Image (cartoon, rainbow, N blue to C red):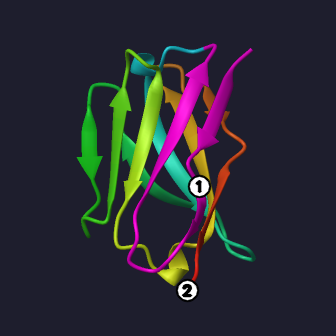
Amino acid sequence: QVQLVESGGGLVQPGGSLRLSCSASGITIRMYNMNWFRQAPGKQRELVAGIASFESARYTEDGRFSISRDNAQNTVYLQINSLKLEDTAVYLCNAVHMTSGQTYWGQGTQVTVSS
């Protein structure tokens, strides 16, 4: 059985940082493109950051988000810096097999940014 389990969310003040983790079981993440999505109340799910199977880390254009993988630990991370109120959402881990396209989702971890 495949499981993606997110952790690391919580309540943080604006300007703070968080590191989210996605621990996978039942799959080997080095065979998967890994993504972090987020969904805020009343809004559509949106892609935050993604990393291809052959990449080890990637930063978003604004530099606030970085995604990385530890294939030995079968875990993917999302580092979020300079958190803003609008970053409040449930953050979900997603795995897409690099050839078959088989897709898996985690249940999500809540990030709340509030002063």
Image height of 75 relative to 18, above or below: above
Q: Which class describes the residues within 10 Å of circle 1: few (<14), some (14-19), or many (20+)? A: some
Amino acid on which disc 1 is placed: Gly
Tell me the magenta residue range: 1-26
Residue 104 in picture, x, y percent from top left: 65, 31
Image height of 101 relative to 48, above or below: above
Q: Residue at x 67, y 39 (%)?
A: 106
Quarter of the image for residue 70 reads: top left
User: Is 62 or 7 nearer to us in this picture?
Assistant: 7
Q: Which residue is mark 2?
A: 115
Image height of 63 relative to 33, above or below: below
What secondary structure do most residues of the magenta stretch adopt? Answer: strand
Quarter of the image for residue 23 reads: top right
Residue 33 in picture, x, y percent from top left: 43, 32
Q: Which residue is mark 1?
A: 9
Residue 66 in picture, x, y percent from top left: 32, 52
